[in-house]
Image (cartoon, helix red, strand yellow):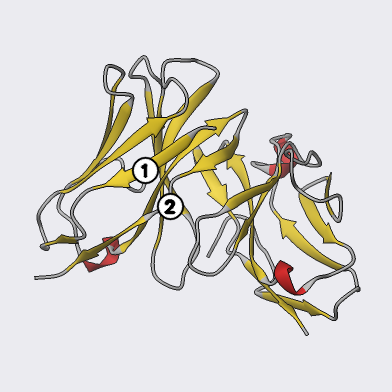
Amino acid sequence: QVQLQESGPGLVKPSETLSLTCTVSGGSISSYSWSWSWIRQPPGKGLEWIGFIYYSGSTNYNPSLKSRVTILVDTSKNQFSLKLTSVTAADTAVYYCARRSSGSYDYWGQGTLVTVSS
Amino acid sequence: QSVLTQPPSVSGAPGQTVTISCTGSSSNIGAGFDVHWYQQLPGTAPKLLIYGNSNRPSGVPDRFSGSKSGTSASLAITGLQAEDEADYYCQSYDTSLSVVVFGGGTKLTVL
């Protein structure tokens, strides 16, 4: 059974960089059958796609966030990561990592709340 | 304003059937991209409910069904149960925006 687990600071100061890691267990990250995504959900609001990465390192980002987002993969650790620069209060959200398979997201992490505040 | 439009809320009594619509456009659902549905119980991560317009992952009861026609899709839940009370989201891909898109979500209340 594939499991994903997000980790990283729960509090980030405005203008700083949000950094999260997703650890994948129960399966290898190294397959072109799926890609690995970050999705966020502001408190009380809907889901917003941030971007995804293949194990090769090929990425696709949401154009609205592209200038601030970097997603990287570390196949040796079976992990992928998210960096979001110049954060503001609008970036406060629960951040989920998820596996994308044939367009749908079949496995999700439990989510981690990141609050942007001084 | 979400690219995919869902009703903010629907409700039904136990045992009844409810339908949740997801309306898109010619650049997403109408362009032939699949629609997927997720159930999000309070305080938990979304769970894949329907993939590829009408397919259920293993373990999802057959009370849940999906369909797609033109620029819209629908999720039907028959034999409503109290445990179905949750938020439901549709998801597709938009070729004009080059983004994965989600509907705004629909809150299902079981009366």
Q: Is residue A62 visible?
A: no
> What residue sits right under mark 1 in the picture?
A5
- Find residue A57 and report its image quarter: top left
* Chain containing mark 2: A
Q: Total marks drawn?
A: 2
Up/down of B18 relative to A41, above or below: below
Q: Is residue A15 left or right of residue B9?
A: left
Q: Is residue A13 above or below residue B62?
A: below
Picture disc at residue A110: 2
**The label number, if any, that marks residue A42 in the structure image:** none
Crowd tier of the residue under label 1, counting other residues whose Cα lies within 10 Å: few below 14, some 14–19, many 20 or above:
some
Which residue does the image show at 54% across and 32% down from the upper left?
Answer: A1
Q: Is residue B73 visible?
A: yes
Q: Position of residue A8 (x, y in %)?
A: 21, 49
Marks 2 and 1 in Cβ contact (< 8 Å): yes
Q: Residue furthest bottom?
A: B111
Looking at the picture, which amino acid does disc 1 mark? Answer: Gln
Q: Position of residue A30 (x, y in %)?
A: 42, 16
Q: Residues within 10 Å of mark 2 (few under 14, many from 20)?
A: some
Pinpoint the chain carrying mark 1: A
Image quadrant of residue A51? top left
Q: Nearer the viewer, residue A81 or B83?
A: B83
